[in-house]
Image: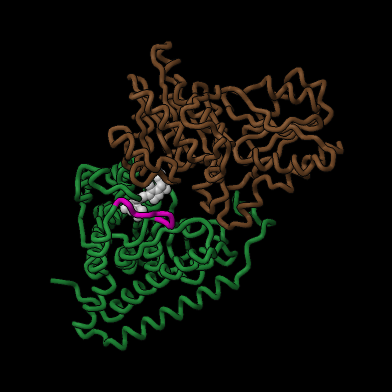
Amino acid sequence: MNMILSKTIHKELYYKMILCRKFEENAAKMFNLGKIHGTTHLCIGEEATGIGVCSVLAKEDYILQTHRGHNQSIGKNMSIKRMMAEFLGKATGYCKGMGGSMHIADFSVGSLGANGIVGGGIPIATGAAFTQRYTKSDSITVCFFGDGATNEGAFHESLNLASVWKLPVLFVCTNNLYGMSTHISKSMNISDISLRATSYGIKGISLDGNDVLSIYRETVKAKEYVLKNGPMLMVLNTYRWTGHSKSDTQEYRTKKEVDEWKEKCPIKRHGEYLLSHMLFSKEDLELMHIQAEQEIRDAVTFAEDSPEPCIENILDDVYAE
Amino acid sequence: MREITYAQAVREAMSEEMRRNPNIVFFGEDIGVYGGGFGVSLGMLDEFGEDRIIDTPISELAITGCAAGAAMTGLRPIVEIMFSDFITLAMEPLVNQAAKNRFQFGGQASVPMVLRTPGGSGTGGAEQHSQSLEAWVCHVPGLKVVIPSTAYDAKGLLKAAIRDNNPVVFIEQKLLYCTKGVVPEVGDEYLIPLGKADVKRIGKDITIITYGRMVPRCLKVAGQFSKQGIDIEVVDVRTLVPLDKTCLIESAKKTGKVLVVHEACQTGGYGGEIASTVVDSEAFPYLTAPVKRLCGMDVPIPYNRYLEAQIVPTEDKIAEAVMQLQNY
Ligand SMILES: Cc1ncc(C[n+]2csc(CCOP(=O)(O)OP(=O)(O)O)c2C)c(N)n1
Ligand SMILES: [Mg+2]
């Protein structure tokens, strides 16, 4: 039988997903206006993954995000204001403007940081889980990475290590079928990535990555499981609607494929569930949208009004005292 | 003569070499339809097909090692590593295998491969997508290291690198990809031998020794100083290993004042090698001022665009260093 989720949880999941969607739509807009330097990786279409997983976690549980990690950060209750400020490279941003969108971190809520190196977070997560076991904490580490990252040595070495040491780490693979332009059929000889767990003698599961409720429920179970048994690999099958990054012309896939996936929008799906189960009314959802839009506007104002970091402080964080 | 971009020059070098030698294959992430992270290989898939333009999984260690193995057995692979920061993942096969296999097997093997990768900051890529790590590879005997600063040099040097029988690390400059330069027509073949520096501007008062994207910047500063009657010679090292010591030393003897400029961090940077090459030579008695280095600050590359621009040698900082030498 399905675990019953409270109205509060439903609201949290839905609100975080629309907040993330609007955050990114806004980020893309600012990008096009030239307000943002560098590049950005949007997770539009994948919101259910990080939000479904992270909403289960306690503050003490660690997460390691990916370059496409806004949904993971928002899921872990990070502040939109400080994320937006970091995006603009401002001193009030999460990393004082030093990291940008690819390196958002908030240690105060257990986020050990997004990574610009594909697979770079996987060994780090393993180490964080080592600490948790060593200090006998009852928290876990969740490590996010993409399908493409599972072809890096870091993935295989870390899963092996975590499996022999039975570390409390949940490896979450966001399978959006592509690593940049490369379809998984060209980069691996399997289509179900959770099979990779078998080589390490750990549990692997594969879920619909656009079903936020099933992701939430399975994560509740997974947290218990990894605390007791050691690592597990959870594969969330989803799709990114936009290009890989700002410079992607998407020659490698068809519009038809993209449109088909847009039909499976995780937000629309959850919204329909809420209405059909009469958990919320149309007006309730409408209000949430208005609130989220206001939150984004406030974040943009905060970020734009914030100061740039100064060159005088550039050496401050190269070494610890 | 026609002008093409630095990126086009790199593409032409690869394509021309691939036409003349069927044993050249090209490995990299998203180099096919996508054309590589910076569009350098756009169109090559159409001409050479999937057998030779090979999209790989995201596995830098494996593809670099695979290239080394293929090189030892008769092919001449080119590997593209999307950002030079990711050579960290390819270091083992590059440093312990490709660089060593000729020597440690008593000369039986040769490893004719080219690892191409773009380096440098200025794109907002932040800490993990902006580094200049050339000093790392310069420190490994068995590897050659090239960093071109113009489209002309990029083409001629890459063709030579592909024909070289050793592993060559060919570091391109992201911020130069779109810059244009005069390059002979396709078919008017030229090669630039590895190990030859190039005097990009002749002068008599001060020598600036530099490479990569700092070359155009130093040339600009030199142009400004010429109006004030200070005549700066700009030497583009082009090939860091092997280093054209003669060229550097001759220029130092002529001007007596040397400024070394590079974008990479100062500590452990290749500028130290260049400076000591000059000091530890017959140029020493000709020097009329200490050899000076102007490098990137010893910090990771920050995301914020203003800070990012300030931690590398700027035109102002280069001009200031020139004045210090001039007034010494
Ligand atoms: C070690 C490394 N190699 C290559 C890249 C360039 N790169 C950035 S994201 C990406 C694709 C990653 O694919 P996947 O893991 O599936 O994540 P997705 O982008 O699909 O979310 C690549 C190749 C990188 N950042 N780091
Ligand atoms: Mg992917």
Residue B226 found in image quarter: top right
Q: Chain B, which colour?
A: brown
Residue B55 found in image quarter: top left
Q: Decide whether the magenta segment is chiefly helix, strand or loop.
A: loop
Residue A108 seen by the camera: yes
Q: Is residue B159 left or right of residue A217?
A: right
Display coloring: by chain
x, y (%) of residue A256?
Answer: 24, 61
Say which quadrant the N terminus of chain A sits in: bottom left
Compared to A177, does B110 lie above or below?
above
x, y (%) of residue B282?
Answer: 76, 17
Residue A168 seen by the camera: no
Compared to A286, does B187 lie above or below?
above
x, y (%) of residue B148?
Answer: 56, 34
| Closest to the observer, A243 or B185 | B185
Q: Which chain is green?
A: A
Q: Is residue A280 magenta?
A: no
Q: Residue furthest left?
A: A1
User: How many marks do you count on the picture?
Assistant: 0
Residue at x 43% of width, y 61% of height: A111
Residues shaded magenta: A245-252
Residue at x 63% of width, y 29% of height: B237
Compared to B87, does A299 lie above or below?
below
| Closest to the observer, A54 or B151 | B151
Q: Residue furthest right?
A: B327
Q: Is residue A250 magenta?
A: yes
x, y (%) of residue A64?
Answer: 40, 56
| Closest to the observer, A69 or B76 | B76
Residue at x 68% of width, y 22% of height: B247
Residue at x 27% of width, y 46% of height: A163
